[in-house]
Amino acid sequence: MVNTRSQTKMADNADLLSLLAEMKKSMEKGQEEMKKGQEEMKKRQEEMKNQIQGVKGKIEEVRNEVQKEDRGNRG
């Protein structure tokens, strides 16, 4: 059977549409993975922020303790 020009063009268009659908699906998957990665990064940043606050609190405690001891040694 001989394909007409329009049949060939329709087949090409169908192939292109199929390819576009695959690309869209792949992009959506990539975007979802990126979103998950960003959420994980935010979670890690929050954890680090909390750890930093804890360290700052500990530093302040030690500083206050040293100042108490220093005042005690002077008096």
Image (spheres, rainbow, N blue to C red):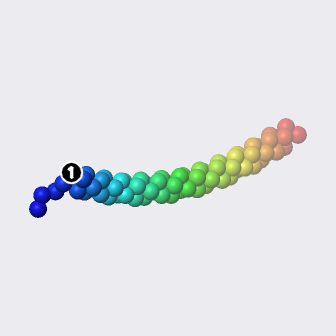
In the image, is 66 to the left or to the right of 16? right
Residue found at x 85% / y 37% = 74
Check disc 1 and report the residue beneath it. Answer: 5
Instruction: Please identify the residue farthest to the bottom as the structure is shown.
Output: 1
Q: Quadrant of the C terminus?
A: top right
User: Where residue 25 appears, x then y in whole percent?
Assistant: 40, 58
Instruction: Tell me which residue sits at (50%, 58%) in the image.
Output: 36
Instruction: Please name the residue shown 34% across and 56% down the image.
Output: 17
Is residue 11 found left or right of 72 in the rendered image?
left
Q: Residue furthest left?
A: 1
Which x, y percent locates residue 12?
A: 25, 53
Of the pair 61 and 6, the residue shown nearer to us: 6
Which residue lies at the image location 77% right of the left edge and 47% below the top edge?
Answer: 65
Q: Which residue, as the protein is rendered here, is positioned at the far top? A: 74
Would you say residue 12 is visible in this rendering? no
The image quadrant that residue 7 belongs to is: bottom left
**Relative depth, front residue between 17 and 63:** 17
| Neighbourhood count class around disc 1 (C-alpha, 10 Å): few under 14, some 14–19, many 20 upward | few
Q: Which amino acid, mark 1?
A: Arg
| Quarter of the rendering occupied by the N terminus | bottom left
Given residues 48 and 61, the one toward you in this image is 48
Is 9 positioned to the left or the right of 26 in the image?
A: left
Asked if residue 52 shows in the view, the reply is: yes
Q: Position of residue 37 (x, y in %)?
A: 49, 54
Disc 1 is placed on an element classified as: helix
x, y percent for residue 61: 75, 49
- Residue 21 figure quarter: bottom left
Q: How many marks?
A: 1
